[in-house]
Amino acid sequence: MAVLLVLYSVAMPAMSKFVVEKNSLRVISPDNLKGNYDSAIGNFGVPQYGGTLLGAVIYPKENRNACKPPDSIASYESRPGRLPTFLLVDRGDCYFALKVWNAQNAGAAAVLVTDNKVESLITMDSPEEDNTAVEYLQHITIPSALIEKNFGDKLKKALNSGEMVNINLDWRESLPHPDDRVEYEFWTNSNDECGPKCGSQIEFVKSFKGAAQMLEKGGYTLFTPHYITWYCPQAFVLSKQCKSQCINHGRYCAPDPEQDFSQGYDGKDVVIENLRQLCVFKVVTESKKSWVWWDYVTDFHIRCPMKEKKYNKECAEKVITSLGLDSKKIDECMGDPEADAENSVLKAEQDAQVGHDSRGDVTILPTLVINNRQYRGKLDKIAIVKAICAGFEETTEPTVCLSEGIQTNECLENNGGCWQDTRANITACKDTFRGRVCECPIVNGVKFQGDGYSYCEAVGIGRCKIGNGGCWQDTKDGQTYSACVPTEPKGCRCPPGFKGDGTNKCEDIDECKEKHVCQCSECSCKNTWGSYECSCGDAFFYMREHDTCISKVASAPKVGWTAVWVILLGLVAASVGAYAVYKYRLRSYMDSEIRAIMAQYMPLDNQAETHNQLHDDTV
């Protein structure tokens, strides 16, 4: 037994740290206490991660440490129209969890435990689950927090003087929520014979499996299982106790399941199965099916329990085969548990236990670490889903986080006070796990811009297809007119024939009354919705582009006698001139022909002279 105690004492490095997870507590009244205060989240019950709770504080006149059951059940239950009751109780004389359990039975909505000494905040842990504690520990459903003594004394003073003390508990920033994916770790153990705590852990795994797999398959979460191991001091490596509780020559150990070295399973059996489950996760993750780990763990718990003596390799391999996993790869990952060497998988687990950044060392089993922040509260499916949902950035949560039973949809009442277009059934109200936000939406690829509260308008290509771009539109007698112009990125403009703001109203323009059209003397104007009709009588038709009337039948033009004589004289003069030109050109042509013929038979005088000149020049 001495060696067992040594194993526990060296579970963590000497400079281990435990981080107290906190939520914000804001005093609303009285005025002299207004402000924000820290409070430490209890490691049991159901903290309202991602939410807030407003209540009125009551400090009981008797049973101020809440260690006794309430004399009257529901004596602190809030009445309709009044704020929920936050019971302020003193630390000491009994378990923290028992105080909260008694307060819950008395009707309190939350419990504030005031410290009884001046010190930094600590985490109120749950007691060891003996037969008495197990009856109530898993049934605590209200949140609780520890507050510092000085602050508690101020609250008591205000209450004793008759002041009304209202407090808002705020868990919205208890978990980081940086983006659209939550990373979380589940620190667990394959041991199923460690009492009520192991039983509740197995039941949680079975109930949470479906939600965990859905979140993982959808890419919403990145999950990693972890297992705590201890090591055996070098001086005791060859002892019977270390050999039965450890593998790899004392490097990786686990407590004896039955706390009895002489019977049942040994700690090394637990370490080997822990290692197998880690290797199952490694293999299924490499095949991009990390969620299958949940199938293996739940199936192993059901098919291979310790109480039936089936907690062994043979049973595990049957589960592996049934899930279609590669047992050879899993065995290669596990390595040789008898080797005097480090196991890379288990060494990584020991390193992961050590706290880093804002996260403390992992010392509590089972527990979850969500976005590098340790979860406080009981292992309950709804509570854990809420905590994971609190890790998503607003408006990026998966559907499960917005379902009934997980949170209240604030957009259902008065549209959350956000902008909406009832005609197109479009709203800027977005329900998130932490509450609604007013944010102009994107509908079918069309983006809306605005403040989200008083207005939003569609912008860009395709905007007219979504609620007509928020513009006016109407139909009469089968004719539809719209103030949305598809070629313009934003805004509304009444179409031709209408006037108005284009958004809420466009009125028909009476073109006839305002004398915009049909201005010719023969025109007759009739106004229509969005347009007009202009006529010019039976013998004429209307040319809309020229706003004029023209005759349907062509008529002979009226010409005067003077014009006729002018035309005739012009024609005669043109004829005479043409004849004269003709005669002249004909005579010139004949002369040239005759001269050409005569030149062939008798030279002219000038030709003879030219010939003699040429002859003289060449002598």
Image (spheres, rainbow, N blue to C red):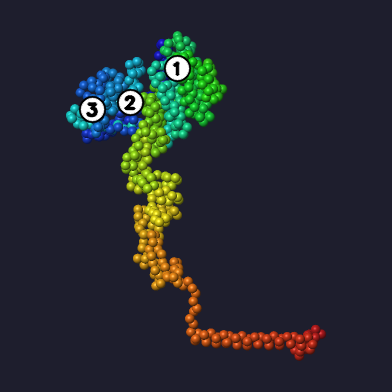
> Farthest residue in the right direction?
619
Q: Quadrant of the N terminus?
A: top left
- Of 299 and 391, the residue lying toward us: 299
The image shows a total of numbered marks equal to 3
First of labels 3, 2 by sequence position = 3
> Farthest residue in the left direction?
161
Which residue type carries mark 3?
Ile
Measuring from the top left, give residue 197's x and y in whole percent: 39, 19
Tell me the CA gap for discs 2 and 1: 32 Å
The answer to whether 417 is drawn above or below residue 246 in the figure is below
Measuring from the top left, give residue 379's x and y in whole percent: 38, 24
Q: Which label belongs to residue 278?
A: none
Q: Residues within 10 Å of mark 2 (few under 14, many from 20)?
A: many
Q: Secondary structure at mark 3?
A: strand
* Residue at the spot of label 1: 254
Which residue type carries mark 2?
Thr
* Residue at the spot of label 3: 58
First of labels 2, 1 by sequence position = 2
The answer to whether 184 is drawn above or below residue 300 in the figure is below
* Residue at the spot of label 2: 141
